[in-house]
Amino acid sequence: MTTSKKSSVQFHSQLDDFKLKNKTLLKNTLLELAQIEDARVGTINYIFCSDEYVLELNKKFLDHDYYTDILSFPMNTDPLEGDIFISVERVKENAATFNTDFTTELFRVIAHGMLHFLGYDDHTEENIRMMREKENEFIRAVREKIE
């Protein structure tokens, strides 16, 4: 008898002052996104943390000495498994820079992490455009469910 591993998207926060709202809705929408892309999901962990924590990971694992809003560490591709670290500080700063609200930018970055696991990248203008379209679809889907 074989057992199948259940899909799981989990959210964790290393910050005392950050609480993610609409977790179940976000989990379900991320799983729908993966399903649309014909991907199976094992366990994906989203970890919300500080700029400094993400910077240290960026230095240690990627040899990059700069701040970033998100780092994705895939551990398996079928089913999709891994950890996604999001700097809440950087998301707040990006929201101000891009003249959007924090929640919209947070949804964008959450989708961005999943899209990386699904094989999308942002190394060319065309790839960036495709990712933005998918991120916007995700944001619309979440907003429709909230309202």
Image: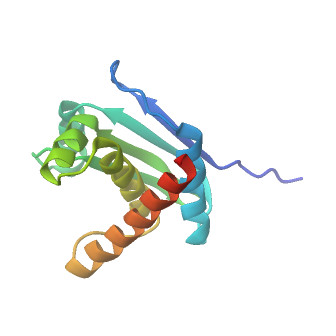
Name, please, the residue furthest toward the top.
16
Residue 110 visible in the picture: yes
Q: Residue at x 90, y 53 (%)?
A: 1
Residue 107, position in %: x, y? 39, 50
Looking at the image, what colour scheme do you see?
rainbow
Q: Seen from this angle, which residue lies furthest left?
A: 65
Residue 78 in view in this figure = no
134 lies left or right of 145: left
Q: Describe residue 26's horizontal placement relative to residue 46 as left or right.
A: right
Q: Is residue 46 above or below residue 100?
A: above
In percent of the image, x 57 and y 52: which residue is there? Answer: 145
Question: In the image, 65: left or right of 51?
Answer: left
Residue 96 locus on image (x, y percent):
16, 45
- The single residue placed furthest to the bottom in the displayed view is 126
User: Between 139 and 131, which is closer to the camera in this rendering?
Assistant: 139
Q: Is residue 101 left or right of residue 13?
A: left
Query: Where does residue 136 sit, x and y in percent of width and height?
Result: 38, 64
- In the rendered view, tell whether residue 65 sits above or below residue 35: above
Q: Quadrant of residue 89?
A: top left
